[in-house]
Image (cartoon, helix red, strand yellow):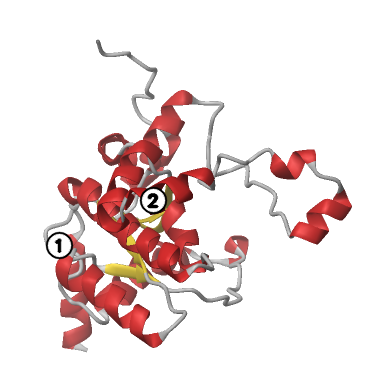
Amino acid sequence: MTIGLDRPKKTKSAQIREKLGYPIIDTDVHTQEFPPAFLDYLEQVAGTAIAQRFQEHLPGASRSKWFNQSWDERRANRTARPPFWTRPTNDPLNLATVSLPKLLHERLQEAGTDFAVVYPNLATMAPHIGNEEMRRAVCRAANTYHADIFRPYSDRLTPIASIPMNTPEEGIEELEYAVKVLEIKAIQIPGHIRRPIPAFEKYGEEDLRYFLSIHPLELYTSLNQDFFKGTGVEKAANEYLSSVISH
């Protein structure tokens, strides 16, 4: 049985996109893993014991911990407050969208976006796990899981691989596996870099175009000119590369 949910025929974002003469590339779309499916991958990578241990501390299982603690307990345990934006639970359609690659692929144009680099929530925290065995298992399983579920939608979506960097050995091994075996085209490594927040009200039309389109093309083709090959923005990428070569 198919459950119908209201979908806007044409969103405001899509209407704005139609007026632009260049593709919009979102370099930071976040998604939410489906825990039962991920746990299957983790068990295949590291065995039942690791999967069971991880399940006991699965992100989301103790989301209410912060709310039940006093300020002293929060400081003593360094308990992080759960972010409100990772699970849009007030809207079932949006919650489903961030969890199901096919639906995200279908709705990308509703957001006025032509192509997106996807940051799955679990993958962003995996390199920070303290236990080496657990850290490497979760990173490997998360990368494999996301490579598999997003592969059919690579014309508009590409996931990042999460690379642990506690030692050079684990970093090199997981990087090579993600790139050479899983064929993931973008990676994330741990780091804390202060990034300036652009003041959009001071930007002109060309500045906005650079931020939304040219810069992502420049960034991802600088090391891999075929990054956008086979995607919905391949033509724009080729035009950009041709303009760079001609200059």
Q: Residue at x 36, y 79 (%)?
A: 171
The disc label shown at residue 49, or none:
2
**7 sits to left or right of 241:** right
**Marks 1 and 2: which is nearer the front?**
2
Using the image, determine if residue 130 lies above or below residue 112.
Answer: below
Could you tell me which secondary element the residue under label 2 belongs to? helix
Q: Which residue is mark 1?
A: 235
Report x, y in % for residue 204. 51, 66
Report x, y in % for residue 68. 78, 38
Task: Bin the neighbour count of mark 1 within 10 Å (Cα to Cα): few under 14, some 14-19, many 20 and up.
Answer: some
- The answer to the question of whether label 1 and label 2 lie on touching residues, with beta carbons closer than 8 A, is no
Q: Residue at x 15, y 72 (%)?
A: 226
Q: Earlier in the sequence, mark 1 or mark 2?
A: 2
Residue 200, image quadrant = bottom right
Of all residues, the one furthest to the top in this rendering is 1
Using the image, determine if residue 233 lies above or below residue 48.
Answer: below
* Front-lying residue, 117 or 216: 117
Could you tell me which secondary element the residue under label 1 belongs to? helix
Of all residues, the one furthest to the left in this rendering is 230
* Front-lying residue, 65 or 196: 65
Q: Residue at x 20, y 79 (%)?
A: 243
**161 sits to left or right of 208:** left
Residue 197, image quadrant = bottom right
